[in-house]
Amino acid sequence: MSKPIKMPIRKPETSADLPATPVLPTRKKPQTCNAPTRGKPRRKIDAAVIAQMAKAVAKMLTESEAARLCGIEPRHWFEWKSRAGRSDRFSALLEQVRANRINHLIERVEKSADGIDTKFPDFRAAVQLLKYADMKRFGDSPVVAINPTPMIQISIIHEQLKKVIGFDPPAKALPPAPKQISPEHED
């Protein structure tokens, strides 16, 4: 006879017998808020930023406006400037930049007055330079120093004026007022 075929018996699988399957990470849902996930990168304050700040402030911008224009926060600029005597050095640099700017503008006015780099010379530029050089001689109106004498108004009550002057005549007694007789009491 033939041999009976034995069927292998399967044991029930337990969690220990299961092969280790990797757990896939689940993706988080995107947040709906507009807050950035990390801070904005800051611009480093270096020599180029300092020069750019000085030029902007020399053009009549405030330091806060200039800082925003340069791409840095104003509070970072003021914190940086307050350390290690940088405020004095920045003031000196700012004064130098302003002087160079004024000198450049005056040179442009002089070139315009002389007709250099322009089609027609402009005499008004030369007149304006004369006004700046000597306002007393070439200004629109003569400079006159007037020192007006101040006017003092004295407002004193009549009684107080009498006391100040010393004029206080003795008061005269007025005669008594006549009695009015009513028609009912006529006797």
Image: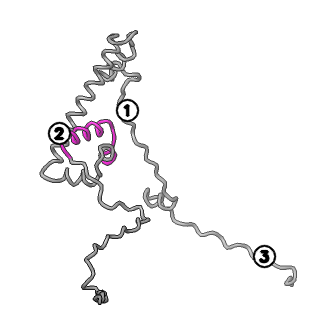
Write the start and end of the magenta stretch as one range: 45-65
Nearest the camera: 145 or 89? Answer: 89
Question: Eyeballing the image, is 47 above or below 127?
Answer: below
Check if mark 1's residue and mark 2's residue have beta carbons within 8 Å.
no
Asked where in the image residue 136 lies, by quadrant, the reply is top left
In the rendered structure, does residue 56 fall within the stretch colored magenta?
Answer: yes
Dot 2: element = helix
SS at circle 1: loop
Identify the residue at horizontal 31%, vertical 23% (top origin). 132
**Figure label count:** 3
- What percent of the width, then of the height, locates residue 179? 75, 76
Mark 2 highlights which residue? 92
> Which residue lies at the image location 23% right of the left edge and 29% below the top edge?
100
> Could you tell me which quadrant the C terminus lies in?
bottom right
3 or 134: which is nearer to us? 3
Kind of residue at disc 1? Ile
How crowded is the residue under tag 1: few (<14 C-alpha within 10 Å), some, or many (20+)? few
Local crowd at mark 2 within 10 Å, few (<14), some, or many (≥20)? Answer: few
Q: CA distance from mark 1 to mark 2?
A: 38 Å
> What amino acid type should be assigned to the residue bearing mark 3?
Gln
The residue at 40%/16% (across/down) is: 124
Secondary structure of the residue carrying numbered label 3: loop
Q: Which mark is residue 180?
A: 3
Density class for disc 3 (Cα within 10 Å; few <14, some 14-19, many ≥20) is: few
Q: Label 1, on which residue?
A: 146
Q: Earlier in the sequence, mark 3 or mark 1?
A: 1
